[in-house]
Amino acid sequence: MLYRLKEGGYAAYLVGGCVRDLLVGLLPKDFDVATDAKPEQVKTLFRRCFLVGKRFRLAHVHFGFDKIEVATFRASASTGLFNKKHYLKSKLGMVMRDNVYGTLEEDAFRRDFTINALYYNIADFSLVDYCGGLDDIHHKVVRLIGDPHQRYHEDPLRLLRAVRFAAKLNFAIEEKTEAPLFTMGELLQHIPPARLFDEIQKFFLFGFSQRALMLLQKYQLFQWLLAQTAHCLSHEPDFIHTHLVNEALKDMDARFHQKRSTSPSFLFAALLWPPMMMLYYQYQGEGLPDVSAYEKAIAKVLAQQGRQVAIIRRISLGAHEIWHLQHQLLHRGPHASHLLQHKRFRAAFDFLALRAKTGEKYEEIVHWWEVFQIASEEEQQVMIAALPAEEAAKRSKSRRRRRRRK
């Protein structure tokens, strides 16, 4: 792709996170390209090219299942010279539109952090560094380009990006870059909930979630992402269900480094478990029946979280199913063999195992399900028949209730 841009008469550089990650020894998850070709000119060179974005006009070039983001060099920010049609800031200082094109050097100083302002030039296989990014990588420092207060106001998501890079790379945050993190968190209220949802996944699904949570709490930013969970972690640290959050993140980090899949539904089920259980106990105390209290708590917690972060419906439904299956896993019976076929069974079972690991007395039930999963059909029937008498009584009572309702 880079060579096609070059053959077309344009400059072409690898830029940003892919260059940074290669320099620190990580495998880049994607590749970004910077060029002096305008988006419309890029589109003429590639058959599967789509122009996206109003705030930042970009070209997305598709190769099979891979997508490469191509950005045109941007000019230095000077609102006095820019037409509102191409460059616009809100009253809060947020950049709402930025489509004024410039030179490579101007583009470097428009980027957010020095470690992301590194360019690999395919023309002579050199690294271009106008902002001291190589030096900051060597000293393991995250540093904003320009005045931190102004840059955070331009895009408050940079507050989270600073923390994410520090957690991912195990870098320190430079003093001037760090200071506003403690006081400017409320700016995140102005970020679209969909962008916050994407950022949460980047924090917690890529192998550094424990460090990320620790830093988010340190800078008091976690409350702007998951306010209900933040309240539980800070005000109810001894609540038994709070312990599950750290254990779940530890498990997900291990899975990532073992190259095993990690599930966003499982992530949100774990992160929102403490506030959901607190509400469940509250509704029980108000006299609601057990099942009604549980379902009402689930609905309210997901609704409140949805107002803060726009969780994709497929993922929120997955979290709901994982929680719903907890009751069925605890009340074993003839339905057990059918439960194994449920698409969320494995995630729900892993969740129950985490609950047992963090202090809930379900070790025996977890062991029963471990054996049940690998047993033959005949052995499964024997295991169901051998369940304790009290569980059989519960099943019988449940069947009688269903008959009466009919």
Image: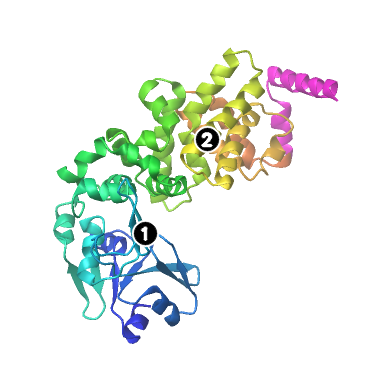
Where residue 89 appears, as percent x and y from the top left, is 32, 53
Q: Amino acid at mark 2?
A: Phe
Quadrant (top left, top right, bottom left, bottom right) of the C terminus: top right
Where residue 195 appears, as percent x and y from the top left, is 43, 49
SS label for mark 1:
strand
Compared with 218, 13 (above or below) is below
Residue 247: say if magenta.
no
Q: Position of 267 compared to 182: left or right? A: right
Q: Toward the viewer: 54 or 238? A: 54
Q: Residue at x 37, y 64 (%)?
A: 85
What residue sits right under mark 2 in the picture?
351
SS label for mark 2:
helix
Where residue 388 appears, as percent x and y from the top left, is 68, 20
What residue sits right under mark 1 in the picture?
97
Q: Main secondary structure of the magenta part?
A: helix
- The answer to whether residue 171 is visible is no
Q: Toward the viewer: 376 or 89? A: 89
CA–CA distance between discs 2 and 1? 43 Å
Q: Residue at x 47, y 27 (%)?
A: 274
Q: Toward the viewer: 346 or 364? A: 346
Q: Amino acid at mark 1?
A: Arg
Where residue 367 appears, as percent x and y from the top left, is 56, 31
Residue range highlighted in magenta: 378-406
Q: Position of 102 compared to 97: left or right? A: left
Point out the frontmost of discs 2 and 1: 1
Label whose residue precedes the other's in the sequence (2 or 1): 1
